[in-house]
Amino acid sequence: MRGGKPPITHKGNYPAEIQQFEQTLRQQGYQRIAGIDEAGRGALAGPVVAAAVILPTDCQLSGVTDSKQLTPKKRAELFDEIHRTAVAVGVGCVDNKEIDQINILQATMTAMVQAIVQITPAPDYALVDGTHLPAISLPRLHRDSEQPARAIPKGDTLIQSIAAASIIAKVTRDRLMIELDETYPGYSFRVHKGYGTLLHRQAIAQLGPCPIHRRSFKLQ
């Protein structure tokens, strides 16, 4: 098992899955395990934001799961608790202009790299929500090991550190969109946070796109 990929199951209790997967990593010698996730990838306006979170060994934060399953109030409470508890937190942000230049996938990967490089010392293993890995270069604990990172589909419902990162990214981006609502009134950014709701699309049809809209996306 040393240097290889530990198994991950998709059955059973959420904390048990976290314990099994992350304990296997720690048995291999990995201690600074960062969970990474993004917010805003599917929005029509505003940036994509990514977060990287390292939690203490054996940490169990009650209520931490995919940020989309939580109320805004609960997300805000957990945002503060994660910051108090985490060993390290990093945040990356790529604006709509760069998204239009390099495409949303590459922008998401860029934001993730930005989040990771904010963490010092660097993580020794990265768990990334989704099916793609950002172009990160982490120190290898074992010479014969593969790149110490793994993409995990639906990782924000399986791995606590990824779920924590999803909350940090979501709350950070939501607060930014509330600020941008004051800069660009009429679009109700504080309500839909830039996503393609009927309210948002009606505003675009009436007012046209504003400077934070993603021109590479289908806005109407």
Image (cartoon, rainbow, N blue to C red):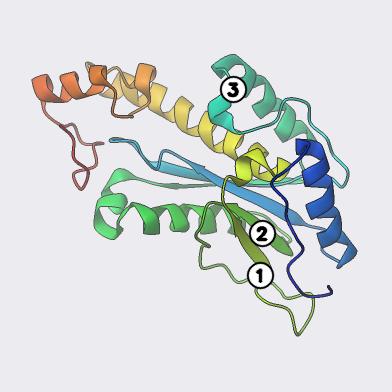
Marks 1 and 3, Cα distance to the nearest angstrom?
32 Å
Of tags 2 and 1, which is closer to the observer? 2
Q: Position of residue 113 (x, y in %)?
A: 53, 59
- The residue where tag 1 is placed is 138
Tag 2: Cα neighbours inside 10 Å, few (<14), some, or many (≥20)? Answer: many
Side of 144 where 67 appears, left or right:
left
Measuring from the top left, give residue 95's x and y in whole percent: 35, 45
Quadrant for the N terminus, please: bottom right
Q: Which mark lies nearer to you, 1 or 3?
A: 3
- Residue carrying label 2: 126
Name which residue lies at 69% across and 69% down: 148
Asked if the residue at tag 1 contacts the one at tag 2, i.e. Cβ–Cβ closer than 8 Å, the answer is yes
| Residue placed most toward the observer, 185 or 79 | 79
Name the image quarter holding residue 208.
top left
Residue designated by label 3: 70
Along the polypeptide, which appears first: circle 1 or circle 3?
3
Amino acid type assigned to the residue bearing label 3 in the image:
Leu
- Asked if residue 122 can be seen in this view, the reply is no
Question: Which SS class for mark 2?
Answer: strand
Mark 3 or mark 2, which is nearer to you? 3
> Which of disc 1 and disc 2 is earlier in sequence?
2
Q: CA distance from mark 2 to mark 1?
A: 8 Å
Residue found at the far bottom of this picture: 144
- Asked if residue 91 lies left or right of residue 56, the reply is left
Vertical side of 77 occupied by 65: above or below: below
**Quarter placement of the C terminus:** top left
Q: Earlier in the sequence, mark 3 or mark 2?
A: 3
Give the answer, above or below, for where 116 lies relative to 66: below
Instruction: List the single residue furthest toward the front.
Output: 11
Q: Which label is found at residue 112?
A: none
- Vertical position of residue 196 compared to residue 117: above or below: above
Query: From the viewer's perspective, is residue 96 above or below residue 112?
Result: above
